[in-house]
Image: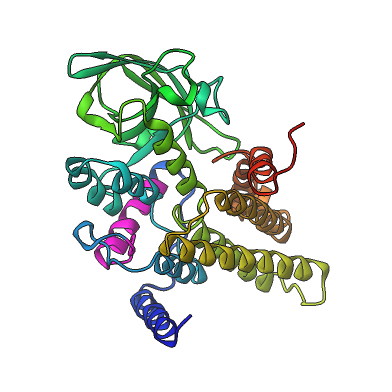
Amino acid sequence: MSRVTVDAEQSFREEIRAWLAPRLPLPPLPLDDIERRDHLTGWQRELYDAGLVAVSFPEPYGGRGLSPVFDAIVLEELGAVGAPSAFHYGYVARVLLEYGSDEQRERFIRPALRGDERWCQGFSEPDAGSDLASIRTRAVRDGDEFVVTGQKVWTSRAHWADWCLLLVRTGAPDSRHRGLSCLILPTDCPGLTIRPFRELTGGLEFAELFLDDVRVPVTNVVGEVDGGWRVAMSTVAYERGPSDVGKIADLRARLHRLVHTMVERGVSTDEPLALDLARAELALEVLAAHVQRSLRDRESGHADLNGTSVDKLLVSSTDQALARLEMIAAGADAVLGRNPRAGFDYLDSRAASIYGGTTQIQLNILADRVLGLPKA
């Protein structure tokens, strides 16, 4: 890496720190769903207006046209002071940037990045989670519209969303990945029912979607009709990228809180808990280094989509390790209400090995596509 690049990255870090300084200390992220939504929406707009959301996007969309590495720098600096990332709509905006029509890019990307409009992703179904090629939600062409019928599940923040990136079957029932399409679905359309369900955390992160003869204009197809598999795989790859969904900032913020808790409780550096913390911090640095390398590969046009499986595995293990330590450090406070964040984070982290593709699926991808191991 050249001296010029190093200087530019350091200068950018200093710009972010100067912007953050008068805002510190930042208020804690609320646990209540509505308060959390409103807090993160306001924070995303602050970041966007400061030019700190999706800085690798072209300038017409509010970005700076910088290397994707600069997106990771923003997240590292936010997490270092315990700040959350923006809402995770950047990966949807990237898919629209890559596959959307000119009209779709103009209409949707900027509002998504600024948080003026919220998005969800309708891929998984009750009988099609990891195997997206087996989805059954059907879209039948009727003139200038598709009529959509089916069900989705595990749709994150659907009850908050204005729009849904919906994966549907437009080909024959047995067409597998060859007959899928992606649609932009407004969440206030007739025939769509959104039913959120409560998690162990007490939150309402996920929802079911029921589609009963929902009409979607053909102009809302992202990419080509029956060409949705490529769009879906790009979406999943970006979703697994911890830089694209802000996970680096969230993990660094958790580390920040954990160190603060240990200092408050007087944990000495020679205790086993401190050694476990050092291991977790090292795992986070390995993840960050891998993300930086992946982003530089993306910039040079040599991105390896299989590498996102490595990202996902590292994210899951690091997330769960930090959450476990946070729970131990909080002790009884985690269950007596004095430190509800620790209990929330621990329960929430258990989903890390499922969402975005299970740990087992990621291991299978690496075994098959990277190591070339024979299938059982």
Dominant SS in magenta: helix
Which residue is depicted at the point 66% across and 71% down?
264
Whether residue 216 sits left or right of residue 132 in the image: it is left
| Side of 82 where 372 appears, left or right | right
What residue is rendered at 49% in x and 69% in y? 76
Left or right of 307, for residue 86: left
Residue visible at 34% across and 63% down? 56
Residue 205, can we see it?
yes
Residue 157 can be seen in this image: no
Residue 16 in the image: above or below residue 167: below
- Which residue is depicted at the point 41% across and 22% down? 179
Residue 315 colored magenta?
no
Residue 42 lies in the magenta stretch: yes
Picture quarter with the C terminus: top right
Q: Position of residue 177 (x, y in %)?
A: 47, 26
Q: How many marks?
A: 0
Q: Position of residue 190 (x, y in %)?
A: 25, 18
Q: Quadrant of residue 108?
A: top left
Quadrant of residue 375 in the image? Answer: top right
Q: Quadrant of residue 210?
A: top left
Residue 59 is left or right of residue 125, and the answer is left
Residue 355, placed above or below residue 304: above
Residue 55: percent from the left, percent from the top? 32, 64
Residue range corresponding to the magenta coloring: 35-56
x then y, percent, for residue 247: 51, 56
| Colour option used | rainbow
Above or below, 254 relative to 120: below
